Image (spheres, rainbow, N blue to C red):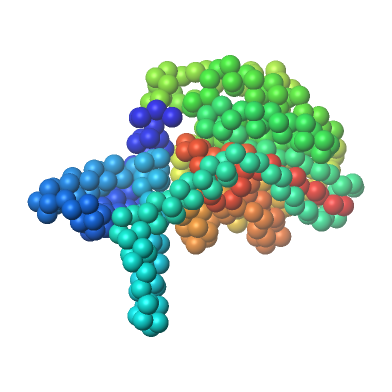
Amino acid sequence: MTFLQIFTLGYHSNYLLAGLAVGLIIAVYSFFRLNKLFNYFNIEEKNSLVCRLFISCIIFIFCYNIQSTFTILLTYLFFSSVLADIIRIVYEIISKYFNRECISIRKFHRNGIFALIFFILIVSFSIYGMSHIDSTNYSINTNKTNESYSILYISDIHYDTIQDTQLFKNKLQEMNNTKPDIIILGGDIVDERTSKTSMEEVFSLLGGLNSTYGIYYVFGNHDKQPNINDYINGSKPFTNTHLINTIKNSGINILEDNFSCINNDIDLIGRGDSGFEDSIPRKNSSDLVNVNSSKFTILLDHQPVDVKLNSKLGVDLQISGHTHGGQLFPYGFASEIAGKYNYGKYIVGNMTQITSSGFTGWGIPLRNEAKCEYVLININQ
């Protein structure tokens, strides 16, 4: 990860207000919290004030990008310090009640040792979360199919960016051993930082997976390269045409606002990605879903959007990715509170919505919300 990425990766102007609010809270807290630390080291009041103002201003300025690595790490340091403050307050209440006091606890809090320990634990757990991949299983019962089907769903690999590629390669045989009837690739298999060679490699590996009825692909919001030079690589690693040809040459079927009928039993609909906050025009669900179909209808959309509409149209199962389950606290927590389909299985009317947290994360090599996963879905007749 370059110095530039630490401060700019993932920036969206839509989140500027949130970033400035977070920066202001952390900056004000830091100004007063650092006073205790500087007093512990006997720094003169004048020098302490200047240093605290300078550090607080830097914190505020660089928190403008709420999705940057710098802001995330700073937020966790803030959480760790607040937790240490809470422990100190609780300790003081207890010590007054029992009329006992431990000087070491006050000392460890004042010089930041407790906060540092909590911070190290959070980051270590987050590193572990990005380096382990599990399977998640779901079962759906239906009377619309003539037989049962198993689906292997893989999304959000972001190949060769922040996760060790060997982790993916180590899981290939495990996924192949599930012997799926249908394999679905849910988008963001590659992104803006994936090299041309790595892009070709990952689709070659995925195309080698075995399935009864084939491998199907829907694009995510990162797969296709931007039309202008991206801010990290300086130029586009590969063209959209080369990407599409690579996918097709790997034996993978692309579904982009069209559908495929599987074994005369399942209507598999793939939607084009909606982009950032519906910025890319695409067909409406009503133009793709056959409301009179008696087949089991599966709608694939990289982002878990139009869920209620798809349910009303008679879709039986919608499968999505994109969210990474929040990836890092408190994003997933806030998403769930906001009523988003952030992670897991949801029942919406007569439709099941499954949102995968994805094979890896994006942008930042840390994960502490949801898990890295591939999904197995059993449709039971």
Task: Please state the total of marks drawn on the protein image.
Answer: 0
Any part of residue 3 in sight: yes
315 vs 113, nearest the viewer: 113
Q: Identify the residue at horizontal 73%, vertical 31% (top origin).
A: 172
Instruction: In this rendered view, identify the residue nearer to me: 365 or 246.
Output: 365
Residue 126 located left or right of residue 27: right
361 over 335 or under it: above or below: above
Question: Which image quadrant for residue 167?
Answer: top right
- Is residue 275 positioned above or below 224 on the image? below
Q: Residue at x 31, y 45 (%)?
A: 63
Q: Is residue 201 left or right of residue 267?
A: left
Residue 217 locus on image (x, y percent) = 67, 32
Quarter in which the N terminus is drawn:
top left
Q: Position of residue 259 (x, y in %)?
A: 71, 36
Does residue 223 appear in this view?
no
**Rendered location of residue 271, percent (x, y):** 62, 38
Q: Relative to the observer, which residue lies in front, 323 or 305?
A: 323
Occupied quadrant, residue 153: top right
Residue shown at the point (37%, 77%) measured from the top left: 100
- In the picture, measured across the screen, residue 199 lies left or right of residue 183, that is left
Residue drawn at (29%, 50%) of the image: 23
Q: Nearer the viewer, residue 46 or 212?
A: 46
* Residue that sits furthest to the right in the current view: 146
Residue 30 image point, x, y percent: 26, 54
Q: Is residue 100 left or right of residue 280?
A: left
